[in-house]
Amino acid sequence: MEQSAADVIRVAGVTKVYQMGRNAVHALRGIDLTVKAGEMIAIMGHSGSGKSTLMNVLGCLDTPTSGTYELDGVRVTGLSKNELADLRNQKLGFVFQGFNLLARTSALENVELPLLYDRSGRRRDTRELARKSLERVGLGARLDHHPSELSGGQQQRVAIARALVTEPKVVLADEPTGNLDTRTSLEIMALFQELNDQGITILIVTHEPDIACYARRIVEVRDGRILRDEPMRQRRIAAEDLKTFAAEPEPA
Amino acid sequence: MRKSTLIKVATQSILKNKMRTFLTMLGIVIGVAAVIVMVAVGYGAQTSIQQQIGALGTNMIMIMPGASNVGGVNQGAATFNRLTPADYEKLKRESLLLSAVSPVVFTNAQAISANGNWRTRINGVSTDYQIIRNWRTQSGTFFTEADLRSARKVAVLGQTVAAALFPDGDAVGQQVQLRDVPFTVIGVLERKGQNAGGNDADDIIIVPYTTASSRLSGWHRLGQIIASTSSPQDVLAAQEEIRGILREAHKLGEADDDDFTIRNQDEIAAAASNATQVMTLLLAAIASISLLVGGIGIMNIMLVSVTERTREIGIRMAIGARGSDVLTQFLVESVAISVMGGLIGVVLGFAGAALVGRFTGWSTATPPEAVLVAVGFSAAVGVFFGFYPARQAASLNPIQALRYE
């Protein structure tokens, strides 16, 4: 395989075995995956397919049992807990299904949080960066709102702003629309597509084909292996779907 | 994470659960307050005993009859008496360091006045007694050298005696019968309060020692000689001087032991303060048990808090918090709670000590270092009891923490 500097993720022969009592659970049975900068990939699979485990490995929250994983040229295998934490902080942005914002903490402070854990000390104006990031996701007017004062879609936008604030190499989104209604899901996907058009690499884990169809490439996982890895043939544009959705009458 | 951010995060989470924080803090508050009140009470008792010993007179030296050691057998002081008025006169004549010397003849008698009667201690002394004991008359005068020389039947009363014998008013000029001998009251002394032994120092009648020997006790030995130097630095040298003079007076050879005992205020004060220090330590030790209980309360609440905030910890870890960041955050929280509790405890402790002081009449002065110790100790309690929960938090697996509902 060609060694390109544009490869942000290079996974080769990754397996993951959990020991559940006496049984060994083979969650991943040999995954090969390369992600280039600027891609938008949907990782699909049913529950129990291993997609969550893959997501955890890619997110440096978990380490593979065997195989190699390189994130932005850094070999992840064998790193200490602290090094993994720093890697997550520097190179990754997370968006979760349940938003995972800190309650009773303003949107601005939520977005600022990853910068406060940045040990490189390269960014001093953390407040300003957080504000810009929130403006980027269209929440410039809600900086001081607490999560409980925001709608689900707005909360997810705050989470996306938090993921973007460190200028990560990859944004990992785990079922980002799982808790949202159709219209808000479309809005979020439109935002992801907009960010991807700006050059941000995005990995979305989902079990919904309706969501996967907004990605440029689709990777399907089943039984711990990659079943299918191909470009999306009929990629949809969320912004356009949103227009037609808005034109339809509201269901009574 | 920066220090300011850490403190802000800790304050936020402390304020999130005000009632719980308050109750947790209460344990430390009570603990620290108890330690401070106890130390203050102990310290107050100590100072008040010191003051009472000081009130006996400044730079006082006491010479008691009897040897500390006779023929290898320790007899204790005052077991036999070779202290005579001649010893006193020799001391007064020859000593260079003593500024005042007075014999003391002890006796007891039923004092009878026109209006009442009262059994009390009678001390026969010389005019220097007033200087040595630092004791002025409130009304009337003390007796003079002339009274002493002629063994006049004059008496100076302590406040308690004066009140018992002359409830209606001024005792000066009145008559008092002691062992059927009529004495004229020429003065009443100022109030001294309790003495170091806890007895009423004002329950006393002072008469010339010459009169006491001849008219009351009928025994020409002295119960004690008391003396004082003009400055505290001279006390030890004066003791040596007294020893030399008395050994000469009693014609003691090189091999003979002293047949008298010399004590100074410092020794008495040291013994008394030793006793109260032990008491203070004991009180503080008991009080610090409640501080320990308060610390366990902190640990309990921090463990609950870690469980409750598992998801928050997961979020922080996912976005790049290291285990040490989480550990520090929880430690700062527990230390903040305990130090705040400690500070409130100090304030309450001072108030409590003042209250105890008002009821007991002791000067319950809290030493400033007790405050530092109390606050430092409560911070240490926060670190000690916060560490285990904080480590629990830091060792969480981020994946499981994020999944926690």
Image (cartoon, coloured by chain):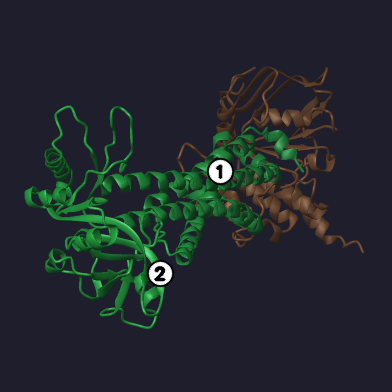
Chain colours: A brown, B green
Q: Residue at x 59, y 47 (%)?
A: B294
User: Of B336 and B156, which appears nearest the observer?
Assistant: B156
Task: Give the residue at mark 2.
Answer: B118
- The answer to whether dots 2 and 1 both sit on one chain is yes
At label 1, counting other C-alpha atoms closer than 10 Å, the crowd grade (few under 14, some 14-19, many 20 or more) is many
- Distance from label 2 to label 1 (Cα)? 73 Å
Q: Position of residue A149 (x, y in %)?
A: 69, 61
Q: Position of residue B276 (x, y in %)?
A: 41, 48
User: Of B267 and A30, which appears nearest the observer?
Assistant: B267
In front: mark 2 or mark 1? 2
Q: Position of residue A33 (x, y in %)?
A: 70, 24
Q: Would residue A114 be visible to someone looking at this image?
A: no
Q: Residue B329 shows which numbered tag?
A: 1
User: Of A39 and A56, which appears nearest the observer?
Assistant: A56
In this picture, residue B326 sits left or right of residue B93: right
Above or below residue B396? Residue B356 is below
The quarter holding residue B169 reads: bottom left
Could you tell me the amino acid type at mark 2?
Trp
Q: Among all residues in the image, which is located at the extreme right?
A: A252
Q: Position of residue B202 (x, y in %)?
A: 34, 66
Could you tell me the amino acid type at mark 1?
Gln
Q: Earlier in the sequence, mark 2 or mark 1?
A: 2
Above or below residue A128? Residue B137 is below
Q: Would residue B93 be visible to someone looking at this image?
A: yes
Q: Quadrant of the C terminus of chain B?
A: top right
